[in-house]
């Protein structure tokens, strides 16, 4: 049995920004919410997938809407609790455990604050294994589950319960409600039993985020670079070493979409790399050939510190190492690729796994 | 008319006198003393002694100082703070000061009040202000706070509620200074609130600085109007500085960038300021220091108010060079002000960057013990030092094109004739006191950074409104209304915020309006 303390929160926040693959919202505000909740209500218990009982009732909780609104209109404790109360009322079942819907970005830590306040455990797992921009991009959807019940709350005391037809409708309706609530809401959806969670949830991701944070936060001893430790931990590959030379951003349908161009150095001296993003990094091409693509994870790390750089924080001259990690197997299925593969984001490639692209790559 | 400029840095206090044509009459460099004012006093004495200026001709005296930075870093002389956040029903999951270092929180002895109010992103009020809550706040603050910080949800979009609350408090606690977040920071409530609290905490410090500076001047018979250097490279009047002390933080590097611009006549360049321990690299954009777009930590507190974009390297004339595992390592340790005793060429035992530059013949000095360098492969080490600076220059550039590089500071002579990324290198005269010159020269600026909604307004209308607001701010700060130029104007759409919202940033500046011209 494990309990999360203040230091753990710090580590999870760093790990969440690596797994956020450039997007997912700055985990900072989530970190502050979780820190204060733990100070006020005590540490949070973490339940592993093995400890899960079949009849446990688990509900994912997350923030929806604009991170720019979330950092200004910060949730109240009542707002965090409201979707759970509405969920219990509509389902007629007591919630035993909460979980993060995504482990990347700010949503990794909002459920920690909720768990502390409600005095219930958090599940060590999530439904993305990373961050994605849309609500239906979850393993539950891949397993054919519907959200059944979605509860949405704001800080003003409004709570809305919907019974959407499927994940796509849930995304559409919940987003409209969120906008009319002032651009940011707290959402509970995809409540599952222990049996279902064992089938659908990607296990161990909260601990994974924490381990990533520990690696990047520990003092450099000089022997092994933190990025190498990270690649070992995540079974990842270093794609490229170089410098950001051009960044183009635009707003398209509420998303930040753009490209970043990198000039190679050292082992990539003669290469160039182009990274395409829509909030998250979704496609990496070296010398005009794809080297990693969504749903696999692409992260841009500071060459010196190994700390992740977000798409918003990336600037000309940044010396970076671009890395990629294989997505969970669930995303590499036909439905996974249909839901969050390169074609869904309108990139002109069929999905090819990272390991294959790496093998085919010939440096110039 | 003569201008006196003083820049108090961590190591040195620099001073300069400029004539009406802004030419350097004389300059000094003395070690910064523990009691900063005695160092300022010495600087004034030396300047007057080495020139024949009449003290009555000194009409303007400007001070760039690290006082406020030091007060925060050392947690000294800070005010007791009353914090008001206009946020309920939102905001309770992250109360003020959550992520602050404990020792700093202890010093502030803060009283906190979360009250009803705040706006949505589009400026529509979430709820109104409640008088009973304000009365309660007044009672809890009375007698136990010296300075108040007010922050409202989405106040950068609409500041009316912050002003309403401030007016009420002013009426009931008339002697207590109030800081408003909408005048200090941008979107991101916690970071803006943090900057506002720091600003409020510095009110005593800045008062003390102003009094000390005035006294130092009066002691020498100088009756000049005083100004303070602020971190955008411009000046502010005493009155303005009393309201916004936080804007003096990081004025040192900006003073040196402004000084470098004036001395080199460059308006767009990279400025490399090499000192004894560190090298600060900044960007000169249209004659002013470029600002950073990222959150900046001040004394362990995350803030989002405007700060210069400075990249600092642990490299200076006194930086130690050591052999470790067969490779030469540059810094970050430095012998600092002890360079004249510790460096090899001066008879010491420590290999420094200055030794290496002498060894390769870039730097020539008289009466040095160059024989001590014979066994050191300076030709191998020197390129490493140059590369550190070249990499930093590259990091600060915004595009691939080579740019002019202005070298200032005591260590400017350590650099070679050419640098990668530079299309030319300028080493202006008086480069050693560029920061004091920058402090003496400064223009007066005004800024406006606001979110506007384009739902029922035209783009050009809101831009014009922002311009006027910035110009008004500059006039209030003491600029000559007839000579104000727009030096920065940008607007960009806001990600994630539904509807058409744009962030507009305008900065204007003009020479200060002298009493005699009014």
Image (cartoon, coloured by chain):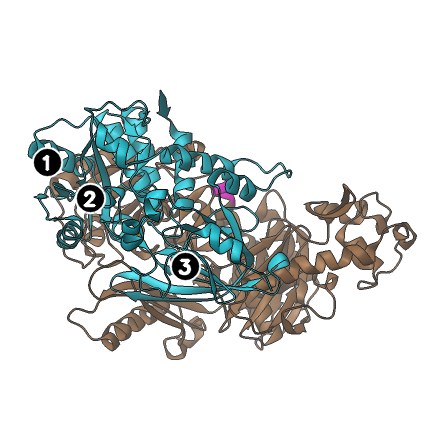
Chain colours: A cyan, B brown
Q: Can residue B307 be seen from the camera position used here?
A: yes
Quadrant of image for the C terminus of chain A: bottom right
Q: CA distance from mark 1 to mark 3?
A: 39 Å
Name the chain letter of the residue that bears numbered label 3: A
- For the point 24% across and 75% down, the residue is B459
SS label for mark 3: strand
Q: Which residues are magenta?
A: B70-74
* Outermost residue to the bottom: B482
Per the image, is A238 magenta?
Answer: no
- Tell me, yes or no, whether dots 3 and 2 are on the same chain: yes
Q: Position of residue A115 (x, y in %)?
A: 25, 30
Q: Chain of mark 1?
A: A
Q: Which residue is mark 3?
A: A283
Q: Residues within 10 Å of mark 1 (few under 14, many from 20)?
A: many
Q: Report x, y in % for residue A298.
A: 43, 52
CA distance separating discs 1 and 2: 24 Å
Number of dots carrying numbers: 3
Q: Position of residue B195 (x, y in %)?
A: 38, 48
Task: Give the residue drawn at x 36%, y 51%.
Answer: A295
Residues under labels 3 and 2: Cα distance?
27 Å
Instruction: First in sequence, mark 1 or 3: give its number.
Output: 1
Q: Quadrant of the N terminus of chain A?
A: top left
């Amino acid at each position: 049995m494990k309990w999360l303390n203040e230091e753990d929160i710090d580590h999870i926040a760093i790990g969440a920004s690596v797994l956020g693959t450039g997007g997912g919202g700055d985990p900072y505000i989530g970190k502050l919410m979780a820190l204060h909740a733990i100070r006020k209500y005590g540490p949070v218990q973490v339940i592993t997938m093995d400890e899960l009982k079949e009849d446990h009732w688990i509900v994912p909780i997350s923030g929806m809407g604009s991170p720019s609104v979330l950092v200004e209109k910060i949730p109240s404790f009542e707002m965090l609790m409201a979707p759970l109360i509405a969920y219990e009322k509509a389902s007629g079942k007591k919630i035993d455990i909460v979980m993060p819907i995504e482990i990347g970005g700010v949503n990794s830590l909002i459920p920690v604050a909720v768990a502390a306040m409600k005095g219930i455990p958090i599940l060590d797992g999530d439904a993305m294994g990373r961050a994605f921009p849309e609500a239906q991009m979850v393993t539950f959807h891949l397993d054919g589950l519907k959200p059944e019940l979605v509860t949405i709350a704001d800080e003003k005391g409004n709570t809305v319960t919907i019974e959407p037809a499927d994940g796509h409708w849930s995304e559409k309706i919940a987003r409209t409600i969120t906008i009319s609530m002032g651009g940011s809401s707290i959402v509970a959806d995809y409540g599952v039993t222990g049996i279902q969670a064992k089938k659908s949830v990607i296990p161990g991701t909260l601990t994974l985020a924490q381990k990533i944070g520990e690696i990047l936060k520990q003092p450099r001893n000089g022997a092994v670079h933190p990025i190498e430790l990270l690649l070992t931990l995540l079974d990842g590959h270093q794609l490229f070493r170089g410098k950001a030379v051009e960044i183009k951003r635009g707003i398209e349908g509420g998303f930040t979409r753009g490209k970043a161009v990198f000039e190679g150095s050292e082992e990539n001296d003669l290469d160039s790399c182009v990274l395409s993003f829509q909030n998250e990094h979704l496609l990496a091409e070296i010398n005009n050939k794809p080297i990693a693509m969504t749903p696999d994870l692409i992260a841009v790390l500071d060459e010196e510190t190994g700390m992740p750089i977000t798409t918003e924080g990336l600037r000309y001259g940044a010396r970076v190492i671009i890395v990629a990690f294989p997505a969970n197997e669930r995303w590499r299925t036909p439905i996974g690729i249909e839901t969050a593969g390169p074609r869904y984001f309108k990139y002109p490639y069929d999905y090819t796994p990272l390991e294959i692209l790496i093998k085919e790559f010939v440096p110039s | 008319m003569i201008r006196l400029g003083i820049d108090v840095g961590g190591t040195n206090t620099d001073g300069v006198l400029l004539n009406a044509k802004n030419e350097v009459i004389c300059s000094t460099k003395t070690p910064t003393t523990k009691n900063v004012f005695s160092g300022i006093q010495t600087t004034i004495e030396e300047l007057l002694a080495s020139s024949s200026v009449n003290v009555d001709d000194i009409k303007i005296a400007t001070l760039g100082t690290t006082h406020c930075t030091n007060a925060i870093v050392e947690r000294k002389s800070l005010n007791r703070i009353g914090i008001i956040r206009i946020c309920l029903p939102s905001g309770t999951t992250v109360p003020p000061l959550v992520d602050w270092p404990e020792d700093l929180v202890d010093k502030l002895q803060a009283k906190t009040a979360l009250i009803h109010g705040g706006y949505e992103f589009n400026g529509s009020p979430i709820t109104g202000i409640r008088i009973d809550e304000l009365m309660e706040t007044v009672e809890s603050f009375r007698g136990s706070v010296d300075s108040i910080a007010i922050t409202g949800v989405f106040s950068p979009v609409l500041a009316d509620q912050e002003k309403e609350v401030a007016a009420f408090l002013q009426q009931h606690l008339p002697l207590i200074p109030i800081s408003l977040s909408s005048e200090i920071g941008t979107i991101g409530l916690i970071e803006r609130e943090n900057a506002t609290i720091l600003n409020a905490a510095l009110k005593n410090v800045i008062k003390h600085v102003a009094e000390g500076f005035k006294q130092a001047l009066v002691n020498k018979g100088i009756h000049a109007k005083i100004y303070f250097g602020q971190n955008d490279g411009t000046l502010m009047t005493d009155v303005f500085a009393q309201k916004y002390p936080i804007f003096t933080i990081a004025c040192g590097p900006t003073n040196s960038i402004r000084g470098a611009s004036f001395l080199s006549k460059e308006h767009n360049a990279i400025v490399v300021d090499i000192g004894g321990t560190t090298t600060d690299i900044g960007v000169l954009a249209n004659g002013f220091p470029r600002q950073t777009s990222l959150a900046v930590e001040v004394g362990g507190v995350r803030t989002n108010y405007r700060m210069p974009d400075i990249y600092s390297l642990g490299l200076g004339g006194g930086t130690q060079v050591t052999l470790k595992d067969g490779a030469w390592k540059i810094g970050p340790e430095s012998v600092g002000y002890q360079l004249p005793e510790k460096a090899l060429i001066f008879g010491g035992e420590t290999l420094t960057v200055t030794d290496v530059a002498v060894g390769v013949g870039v730097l020539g000095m008289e009466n040095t013990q160059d024989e001590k360098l014979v066994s050191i492969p300076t030709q191998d080490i020197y390129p490493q030092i140059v590369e550190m600076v070249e990499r930093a220059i590259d990091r600060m550039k915004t595009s691939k094109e080579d740019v002019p590089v202005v070298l200032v500071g005591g260590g400017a002579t350590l650099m070679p004739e050419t640098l990668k990324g530079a299309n030319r290198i300028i080493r202006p005269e008086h480069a050693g006191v560029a920061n004091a010159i920058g402090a003496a020269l400064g223009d007066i600026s005004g800024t406006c950074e606001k979110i506007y909604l384009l739902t029922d307004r035209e783009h050009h209308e809101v831009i014009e409104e922002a311009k006027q607001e910035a110009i008004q701010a500059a006039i209030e700060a003491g600029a000559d209304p007839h000579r104000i130029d727009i030096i920065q104007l940008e607007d960009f759409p806001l990600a994630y915020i539904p509807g058409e919202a744009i962030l507009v940033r305008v900065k204007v500046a003009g020479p200060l309006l002298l009493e005699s011209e009014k």
